Amino acid sequence: MRRFFWFLILFFAGCLLLAWQGWEHVYRENTDPVKKHRLLIPEGSDWQDVMQLLRDDSAVLNLNTLNRVAEWSGYGDMVKPGYYRITPGMNNLELLRMLASGRQTEIRLVLRGRWSKERLIGYVSSEITADSMTLVQLLNDSTALSRLGWTPETVLALFIPNTYNFWWTTSADQFMERMQREYDRYWNTERKQQAQAVGLTPLEVSILASVVDKETSKADEMPTIAGVYLNRLKKGMKLEADPTVIFAVGNPDIRRVTYAMTEIESPYNTYYVTGLPPGPICMPSVQAIEAVLNPDKHNYLYFCAKEDFSGYHNFTHDYNQHLVNSRKYRLELNKRGIR
C-alpha cells in the first residue's frame, strides 16, 4: 500500500513536471523584452532558414524551446514568406501562430516628388521584394509598359507621390499594377476637367509639373511658375526651362546652366525644342501637379532666381526687365564663385 502511495506521488509529480515544462515551452514569454524585431522570410525558405534568421537577429530568447514547439505543432512544414514584426513579450505559441498563418505586417512605402527613375527603383527595391533589376527592365521595356499605356519616357507620370501600404512579398508586376490603380484613382473626372481647362492632358500636366518641381521647392510659388509656362505655351514660345537642360545634359549636380548647354540637341532641352519634353524630368509632386491644374492668372512670361538666393524668383512680363533680373543673378553667381 505504501509503495502504491509513493507511486501515485511520483506519478503526479511527473505529470506536474511535464505540465510545467509544457507551459514553459508554449506560454512563457520568449522574445526580446525591450524592442521589436523585423523578420523577413524570403520565398523558398524552410524552418531551418527561419531559425537561422532568428538566431542572427537575437529576436528569440530560447530557440530550443521554440524549435520543440515548432516540431510538436508541425510548423516546420508551413513556412510562409513575408515580413513579420516580432514584438516584446510574445510566447512561442503566439509567434508560431503568426508565422503559420502568414499574418504579415505591411510595409509603408513613402513615394516623394522630384525623384528620378533611378531613385524610385532603388527605394522600392530596398523596401519590398520587387527586384531592382526587374524594375529597371520593366520601367524601360516599351512592350511591357504599353500594356499599361506608358512608355519608358512617360512612365514617371504613373507614380503619384503618397504613402502606400504593401506586402513585403509584392513583386515588380504587382507593384506596377497597384500604382496604375492609384493613378486612375487620382486622375478622377474633376482633375481631368481641370487639365482640359488649362489646355493639357493629364500626362502633359505631369510633364509640366515635373519642370515646375525642379524650378522651385517653394510650394507657394509653384502656381505662379506654372502660370508663366502656360502663358508661354499659349503664345507658342519655347519654355526655356533650365531644369530641362540639366536633365538633357545628364548631370544633376550642375549649378549653373551655360549658353553652350542650351544649344544641346535633345528633345528634353526646351531651349532647343518648342513645347513640352517627351516625358517628366522627375517624378512630379502632388503640389506641383495641383499648381499646374490651378495656376495663378497673370501676364508674366519670364522669371529668374532672386539674387539673394532665397529660393524665390523675380517675375516679369517685360523682356528687358528680365534681362536686368538675370544680370543681377549672374553677378551674384560670379561673386560666389559658382561656375
Image (cartoon, rainbow, N blue to C red):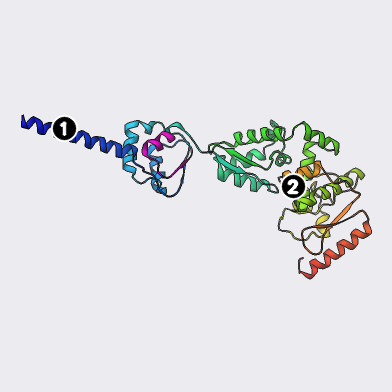
Count residues near mark 1 (Cα–Cα under 10 Å), then give few for <14, some for 14-19, many for 20+. few
On the question of residue 62 being in view, the answer is yes
In the picture, the quarter occupied by the N terminus is top left
Residue 92 against residue 212 in the figure, above or below: above
Q: Is residue 132 visible?
A: no
Residue span colored magenta: 84-99
Identify the secondary structure beneath mark 2.
loop
Name the spot of residue 75 as percent of width and height, x first.
38, 32
Q: Residue furthest bottom?
A: 335
Residue position marked by numbered label 1 in the rendering: 11
The quarter of the image holding the C terminus is bottom right
Q: Which amino acid type is marked by label 1? A: Phe
Name the one closer to the observer, 198 or 150: 198
**Rendered location of residue 307, percent (x, y):** 81, 64
Does residue 267 belong to the magenta stretch?
no
Q: Is residue 311 above or below residue 144?
A: below
* Residue 122 location (% of width, % of height): 60, 47
Q: Residue at x 64, y 48 (%)?
A: 119
Q: Which residue is mark 2?
A: 281
Q: Is residue 121 left or right of residue 274?
A: left
Task: Tell me, yes or no, whether the highlighted magenta stretch contains residue 85.
Answer: yes
Using the rendered view, name the quadrant where residue 68 is placed: top left
The answer to which of 143 and 226 lies nearer the viewer is: 226
Q: Earlier in the sequence, mark 2 or mark 1?
A: 1
Q: x, y (%) of residue 58?
A: 39, 48
Residue type at the position of mark 2: Ile
Give me the residue at 76% from left, 66% from top.
338
For this rendering, which residue is in front, 321 or 121? 321
Spatial separation of the CA atoms under disc 2 and disc 1: 78 Å
